């Protein structure tokens, strides 16, 4: 008698469900019980039609995509990890003693080798105030490093170790990134967990954050790849193993509100890094315009508390003699409220507007002096060396 195809299919389905149920029972008893039930049903069922295995099963798309993504991450890390270093900053030393030796305060961050000559890019705040610098390579070797140049406004610095000590990383095109693209952060969180790898996505582009009063870092990449203390200065990497950003900071809260935020990391895009690094490597500084004033940034609350009839502006506390500001007629107590017809505001602070110009540019400043509003033309100079 030929088996009934419908019955056969039903029987196979039931067997599969029973075996699956048996395997979910606890311990060896559950598995044995499930297997026994399946065996009895086989003995009392018509012979099953043979199942053809000539056609291979198609892979599960999600599983295949996950495997490909994992492989892409591991390949990118393998490519770039040898170029990632730990930067150790020995700050001003306390008095040494015969027993304790050098009592320098030590801080650390991350960096990445970017040239065959041994240049390393990191954050300016990682090497700030250094008395001595060291670099720990991916293989654990420690080398002395020399400071080349820093730019606090971009939070970037270049230091240098001996040529050929580690391979140079390649820069990618940060302008080609899109929200949702996979990115990898590599660095040394907490200083000693070297070459730690975390993975996330580009969360957003063109973010701005205030790092200095009245100044916002602009055009930042936002990522949810975990960034911790010590990751500063390390690379943000794409799946090609190319540097698309330099990690700079992470936001974990919202002021005094007590709200805890996670997954808010920020990186300087590689196309910005390349411009700044080129100037730091060749001349040690980034040429910035110079006005010659000391100032405080005013917000509506601060202005109101001081009886100033402005919304946003730069309150001048000092004018440097023989500076462009002094030559233009600016005075202590003046409030700069705009430049070239554009008023200053929360999203358009004074310092950002100033830094868009180069030495030698002429700008028109809108100035509040008491009840009067003036327009003063000034030619910017080059910022003196610190």
Image (cartoon, grey):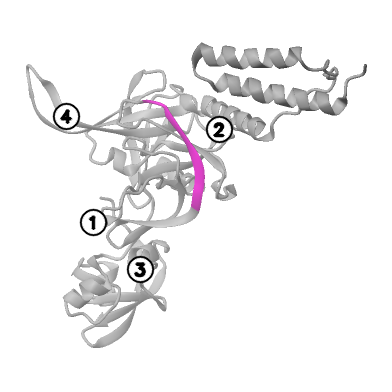
Residues packed near mark 1 inside 10 Å, few (<14), some (14 to 19) or many (20 plus): few
Q: Which residue is mark 3?
A: 346
- What secondary structure is found at the residue carrying circle 2? loop
- What secondary structure is found at the residue carrying circle 4? strand
Vertical arrangement, residue 336 with respect to residue 241, above or below: below
Asked if residue 200 is among those painted magenta in the image, a careful observer would answer: yes
Q: Which residue is mark 2?
A: 241
Pointers 4 and 3 in contact (CB under 8 A)?
A: no
**Which quarter of the rendered picture does the N terminus lie within?**
top right
Q: Which residue is mark 4?
A: 104
* Left or right of residue 7, residue 158 in this image: left
Q: Which residue is mark 1?
A: 256
Task: Compute the Cα span from label 3 to label 1.
Answer: 20 Å
Choose mark 3 or mark 1, whichever is in front. Answer: 1
Task: Compute the Cα span from label 2 to label 4.
Answer: 36 Å
Residues shaded magenta: 194-204
Residue 69: where, in percent of width, then height? 60, 33
Vertical arrangement, residue 321 with respect to residue 184, above or below: below
* Left or right of residue 243, residue 56 in this image: right
Task: Compute the Cα span from label 4 to label 3.
Answer: 40 Å
Task: Compute the Cα span from label 1 to label 2.
Answer: 39 Å
Pointers 2 and 4 in contact (CB under 8 A)?
A: no
């Amino acid at each position: 008698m030929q088996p009934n195809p419908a019955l056969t299919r039903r029987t196979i389905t039931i067997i599969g469900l029973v075996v699956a149920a048996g395997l979910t029972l606890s311990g060896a008893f559950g598995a044995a019980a499930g297997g026994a039930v399946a065996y009895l049903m086989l003995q009392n069922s018509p012979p099953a039609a043979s199942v053809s295995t000539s056609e291979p099963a198609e892979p599960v798309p999600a599983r295949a995509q996950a495997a490909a993504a994992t492989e892409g991450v591991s390949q990118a890390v393998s490519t770039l990890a040898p170029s990632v270093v730990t930067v150790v900053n020995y700050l001003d030393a306390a008095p040494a003693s015969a027993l304790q030796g050098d009592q320098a305060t030590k801080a650390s961050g991350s960096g990445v080798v970017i040239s065959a000559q041994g240049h390393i890019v990191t954050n300016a705040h990682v090497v700030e105030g250094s008395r001595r610098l060291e670099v720990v390579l991916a293989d654990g070797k420690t080398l002395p490093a020399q400071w080349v140049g820093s730019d606090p406004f971009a939070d970037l610095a270049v230091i240098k170790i001996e040529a050929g000590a580690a391979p140079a990383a390649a820069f990618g095109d940060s302008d080609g990134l899109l929200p949702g693209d996979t990115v990898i952060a590599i660095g040394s969180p907490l200083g000693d967990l070297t070459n730690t790898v975390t993975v996330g996505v580009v969360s957003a582009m063109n973010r701005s954050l205030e790092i200095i009063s009245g100044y916002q870092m602009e055009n930042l990449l936002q990522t949810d790849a975990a960034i911790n203390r010590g990751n500063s200065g390390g690379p943000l990497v794409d799946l090609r193993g190319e540097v698309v950003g330099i990690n700079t900071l992470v936001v974990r809260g919202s002021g005094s509100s007590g709200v805890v935020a996670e997954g808010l990391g920020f990186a300087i895009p590689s196309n910005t890094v390349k411009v700044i690094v080129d100037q730091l490597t060749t001349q040690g500084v980034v040429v910035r315009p110079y006005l010659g004033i000391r100032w405080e940034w005013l917000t509506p609350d601060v202005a109101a508390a001081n009886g100033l009839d402005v919304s946003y502006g730069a309150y001048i506390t000092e004018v440097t003699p023989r500076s462009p500001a002094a030559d233009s007629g600016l005075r202590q107590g003046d409030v700069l409220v705009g430049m070239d017809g554009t008023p200053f505001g929360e999203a358009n602070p004074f310092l950002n507007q100033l830094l868009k110009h180069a030495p030698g540019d002429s700008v028109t400043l809108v100035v509040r002096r008491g009840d009067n509003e003036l327009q003063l033309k000034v030619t910017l100079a080059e910022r003196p060396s610190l």
